[in-house]
Image: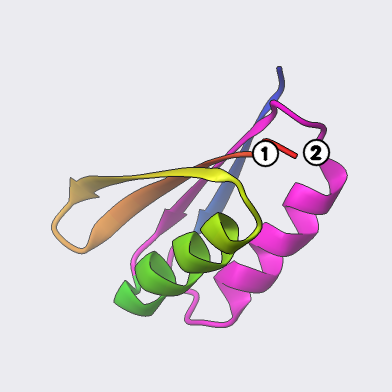
Amino acid sequence: MAEKFLDCLGEACPVPLMKAQKELASLADGDVLTMTVDYPCAVKNVPEWARGQGYNVKIEEIDEETWDIVIEKTK
């Protein structure tokens, strides 16, 4: 299992979503992508898309208005 990290602080949608799609395409099944975001729209859009792909998603609030989105590629 590999783990990849993306810093998307200061990036508004759709940039975090596009970065997530690109990174997940290069990961193998069982790998994990952790993204740090600070835009509420990314906290909604990225997990919604990932769940639609069948991936496991967990959201962790790190700070006020800063979140880690942890996506496990399960396909």
Residue 13: % across, % down: 51, 82
- Asked whether, in this view, residue 6 is left or right of residue 66, the answer is right
Q: Residue at x 62, y 50 (%)?
A: 54
Q: Does the magenta stretch include residue 12?
A: yes
What residue is pinned by disc 2?
A: 27
Residue 24: % across, % down: 74, 49
What amino acid is found at the position of numbered circle 1 in the picture? Lys
Q: Nearer the viewer, mark 2 or mark 1?
A: 1
Seen in the picture, residue 4 relative to 17 is either above or below; the reply is above
- Asked whether, in this view, residue 46 is left or right of residue 28, the answer is left
The magenta span reads 9-38
Tell me the distance, in whole angstroms, between the alpha carbons under discs 2 and 1.
7 Å
Q: For the residue labelled by badge 1, is the local secondary structure a helix, a strand or a loop? A: loop
Residue 74: % across, % down: 67, 36
Comes first in the chain, label 2 or label 1: 2
Q: For the residue labelled by badge 2, is the local secondary structure a helix, a strand or a loop? A: loop
Q: Which residue lies furthest to the top in this view?
A: 1
What amino acid is found at the position of numbered circle 2 in the picture? Leu
Q: Residue furthest left?
A: 64
The one nearer the camera, 40 or 8, is 40
The one nearer the camera, 61 or 51, is 51
What residue is pinned by disc 1?
A: 73
Q: Do the residues bearing badges 2 and 1 touch, measured as CB atoms within 8 Å?
A: yes
Seen in the picture, residue 61 relative to 43 is either above or below; the reply is above
Q: Which residue is drawn at 61% across and 77% down?
A: 15
